[in-house]
Image (spheres, coloured by chain):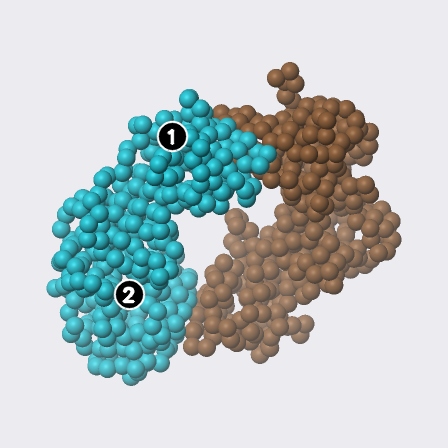
Chain colours: A cyan, B brown
């Protein structure tokens, strides 16, 4: 194989496929990326068996062929090359020369034949989203997946399509995040659970432009994301997702309208007094259009008041401040509405149209205190 | 004690004294910073017994007094306060209230009486440098101190004043870095060894402006740096510094004039092929106005040529690439001169005026190979 391409193009593509190179693996071939040059162009591939990424590189093919190179070493070399044309050529033993200006590297490659190819997926009836929308919806929900592998379903996100509506849902046992997106077209109903790790990696690759589209294809076991010159294939998580609709009551006893930035800064300050070892809640006293936040830990105490508009009954309720902060950070509205029922029932942060719903369970506090 | 000051002023000063708060200590009082308000103003102090920093904060004193607060907690609280006026007040038990807008923190402080005060140093005949010069000279030399505490002298830098010349020297057994600065005035001869850690911390605090000055006062055991509203006191390292002048031969067999950026990028690329565990040298072949760099490791090999101007004999010599990179990174000249004697003698990178000299020992290589 012998190819020539610009360093910046090559680096860009290498950085994309690197997301699918496992940090640790018992199969050394998975630490490689594949460079393949044939009549359909130059293609880089990496695959950790759950997530596979393929992307094209602009360049000239002098001789067709394929080689597997250690992804970490190859990417570090490419990163440091001068900004100029790079020539990559392999001999019959897969010794690979990388030449750029006067720098000439030589590293030992492998044939790549044992490399697991990406699953074949029929490209029919894609779900079409803008890169911006997909990147945003991942950011707005992925923080509340669980990282506990013992409950596989919680480590993924539900993508639920109903006609022209996409709901993306994640939950971790303490909270639920839901985002609703109106689609341009109508689709057949579908429910799939996509691994959170995949979504995290995809959102790093997505340009996030509103004018660029992503096509998403589903099979029973896989999803394929196609955008720009890149294809990402991921395994789906098998099983039935939680029935969350029955938890989404719209009844409430107290409704609070509060400035988001003020509330977030206030909780961030309060959380300074928490050491990781002690899980002290913040305590909210909502009464007479006043929102009083209290925290009392081994380090010290803090109290802060925020003016609010409220409806309904007064309430005293405790929360893990992290859960409130996570949700508030991904809401772009200037003011948010918080709906509360009682000190033991979940609270809801949601907008009128329910384009977002963040359900957060309270922490039991001794209300008498 | 009760004081009021702006959050930004307070944060700025807290960040300065934080540099002298030890990460680990067996004396809990040293984890505190002292706030002292009296007729000379508001002052913050921290002291890890080797390095002590005092700095002033603009503000109003409502009630004089002093308190010791856990530096980490206090600094985190201050960092997160709104940008507005902060009020700090203590009661008779040193419970300290920090109030800013509607946020009210309460943390437990201590009297601060057991806090070790900074050594008294007579302020006479200071050495005067611009902040820029001091910050630069530290950056240009401090990388070659040793971090091995078993040889205390190597962990510091020699500041040697002779008439109107200051030489700053560091060495670690593999290399020597020397910078020479011409002073505006003449001074009495003086030699002191300042801990590298202190210099690193000072350089982070220095604004680096050419128009701001630093006054440095010396006693037998201490040095005091005075700049802006800050005073830094450090212990000196006791003992006799190495006699380095006899190592600084100006004889050479080969002189190379080379583009600095080209050389540095080339060595950076070569060092990619080195894993931390194997200490492979780079091998330089200097011959016929060509500079050939070779490296050969378990990962792969690299060869690169650079055009040079040379005088004298051809030579093949090996180096630890890190030492060359460290020196080249702090030289601002576009081209550098490298002087070589033989494959076992140190090389010198220096300018005509010898305002900088970087001596680097070669690595033994089998020249036949």
Give the chain of mark 2. A
| Residue B46 drawn above or below residue B351 | below
For disc 1, the neighbor class at 10 Å (few under 14, some 14 to 19, many from 20) is: some
Q: Is residue B349 left or right of residue A231?
A: right
x, y percentage for residue A331?
Answer: 33, 67
Query: Does any portion of residue B193 appear in the rendered image?
Result: no
- All told, the count of numbered labels is 2
Q: Which residue is mark 2?
A: A319
| Residue B196 drawn above or below residue A35 | below
Q: Toward the viewer: B27 or B306?
A: B306
Q: Toward the viewer: A334 or B4?
A: A334
Query: In the structure shown, which secondary structural element does the residue marked by tag 2 occupy?
Result: strand
Residue at figure coordinates x 65%, y 37% from the top left: B263
x, y percentage for residue A27?
Answer: 32, 30
Q: Mark 2 or mark 1, which is nearer to you? A: 1
Q: Which mark is residue A65?
A: 1
Q: Is residue A29 left or right of residue B297?
A: left
* Image quarter hosting the N terminus of chain A: top left
Give the chain of mark 1. A
Q: Toward the viewer: A36 or A15?
A: A36
């Amino acid at each position: 194989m012998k190819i020539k391409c610009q360093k910046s193009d090559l680096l860009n593509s290498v950085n994309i496929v690197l997301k699918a190179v496992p940090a640790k693996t018992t199969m050394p071939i998975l630490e490689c990326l594949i460079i393949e040059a044939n009549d359909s162009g130059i293609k880089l591939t990496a695959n950790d068996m759950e997530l596979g990424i393929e992307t094209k590189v602009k360049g000239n093919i002098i001789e067709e062929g394929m080689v597997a190179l250690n992804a970490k070493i190859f990417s570090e070399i490419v990163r440091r090359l001068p900004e100029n044309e790079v020539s990559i050529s392999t001999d019959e033993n897969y010794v690979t020369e990388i030449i750029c200006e006067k720098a000439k590297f030589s590293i030992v490659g492998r044939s790549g034949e044992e490399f697991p190819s990406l699953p074949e997926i029929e490209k029919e009836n894609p779900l079409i989203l803008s890169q911006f929308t997909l990147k945003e919806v991942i950011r707005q929900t992925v923080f509340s997946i669980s990282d506990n592998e013992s409950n596989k379903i919680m480590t993924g996100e539900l993508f639920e399509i109903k006609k022209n509506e996409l709901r993306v849902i994640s939950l971790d046992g303490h909270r639920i995040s839901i985002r609703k997106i109106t689609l341009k077209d109508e689709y057949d109903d579908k429910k799939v659970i996509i691994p959170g790790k995949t979504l995290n990696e995809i959102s790093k690759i997505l340009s996030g432009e509103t004018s660029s589209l992503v096509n998403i294809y589903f099979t029973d076991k896989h999803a394929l994301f196609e955008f720009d010159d890149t294809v990402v294939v991921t395994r789906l998580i098998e099983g039935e997702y939680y029935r969350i609709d029955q938890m989404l009551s719209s009844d409430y006893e107290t409704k609070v309208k509060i400035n988001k930035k003020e509330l977030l800064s206030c909780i961030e300050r309060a959380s300074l007094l928490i050491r990781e070892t002690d899980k002290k809640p913040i305590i909210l006293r909502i009464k007479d259009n006043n929102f009083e936040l209290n925290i009392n830990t081994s380090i010290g105490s803090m109290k802060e008041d925020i003016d609010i508009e409220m409806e309904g009954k007064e309430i005293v309720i405790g929360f893990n401040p992290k859960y409130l902060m996570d949700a508030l950070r991904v809401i772009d509205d200037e003011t948010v509405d918080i709906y509360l029922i009682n000190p033991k029932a979940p609270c809801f942060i949601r907008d009128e149209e329910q384009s977002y719903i963040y359900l957060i369970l309270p922490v039991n506090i001794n209300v008498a205190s």
